[in-house]
Amino acid sequence: MAHTASISQLQTPPWALVNGELVPYTDVKIHIGAEALTRALSVFEGVKGYWDTAGEVFSIRTPRRHYDRLRRSASLFHIPVRFSYDQFLAGLEKLAGELLVTDKDLWFRPTMYVTHGHWGEATEADLVVTAFSQRKLDPDPMRLGVTSWRRASDLVLPTRVKSSANYVGARMARIEVRRLGYDDAIMLNDAGRVAEATGACVLMVQRGRIVTPPTSESCLDSITVDILEEVAKELGMPFDRRPIERTELLAADECGLAGTISELTLVSELDGVEYDQTGLLAQLRQRYLELMRGDLVLPGVELAPLADVSRQLLPAEAGV
């Protein structure tokens, strides 16, 4: 099975957004001397938009939290942010107005590329937003392998920064396990415990409890995992954040990958060990999608409407 994110970014949409202006996708350029290239200085987000069940209203999931995390990533890398939340949301709205089709959802990738500056002096960055269509179909369960590549510790590369540099090791890991016939890789941290997959966080079920590693285990501070925890509580499912040993994951009853683009994708196998596909994680995934489609409302989970079925844009409001 092709990885969902790979399917998305192999697309060539007609438009991108550069500092708030629509630019033909193929015309977006970055100078060879930019620190985005010479020192891998860029931070990004993945933001998902969903059509409701009726196919009438398109909404962005938790845009404020993604904006805040983008600002936090930029701050930790000493990259100035010169756009407000309202400008950020208006940019997503503008791009959605050009790319939306009623039979597919949309996944946005806002990226801040450092275009000017040198070793932290006079740093400037462009905000480039690209967006890719997403099928509404459930993804196939994934087969995983544990990679020999490790997730960098917070002392090597800040794990709370959602940066392109953090995914170099993930790229190596995915290439390694694909040679073995797997779809994705589980990466361990420098202590040999479970960190995350190459582009998503890890959840497992053990003795009727959902478990995921905390951010101190070198995994991303995941917005999707936070939402899944709230959904699990609403369903009465115990949810723990604690370290997970490699063999503990292999001995688990269920396994899944969680992220904005992955949502909650079930794992069928890890290194030859098979998992149940009909347990708590399957129920949790179904409930999460009901929330995203507007069939369920959960306090604290924002869905900001951007467009209706007639393609007429709605006013973008912070905190909708």
Image (cartoon, rainbow, N blue to C red):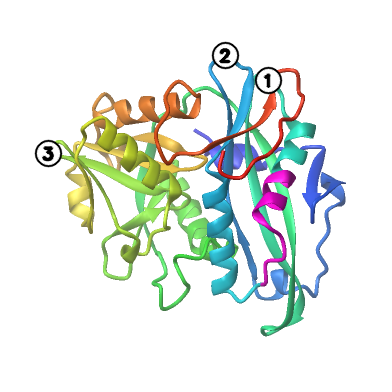
Which residue in the structure is indicated by mark 1? 102
As for residue 90 lying within the magenta part, the answer is yes
Which residue in the structure is indicated by mark 2? 54
Q: Is residue 248 above or below residue 297?
A: below
Say which label, 2 or 1, has the lower sequence index: 2
Residue 125: x %, y % from top left? 73, 68
Say which label, 3 or 2, has the lower sequence index: 2
Which residue in the structure is indicated by mark 3? 207
Q: For the point 71% across and 75% down, which residue is it?
A: 38
Callout 1: few (<14), some (14-19), or many (20+) C-alpha neighbours within 10 Å? some
In the image, the segment drawn in magenta is 80-91
Mark 3 against mark 2, which lies toward the viewer?
2
- Name the foreground residue: 162 vs 21: 21
Q: For the point 82% across and 45% down, which residue is it?
A: 25
Mark 1 against mark 3, which lies toward the viewer?
1
- Name the foreground residue: 269 vs 45: 45
Q: Are marks 1 and 3 in contact (CB under 8 Å)?
A: no
Q: Is residue 21 above or below residue 99?
A: below
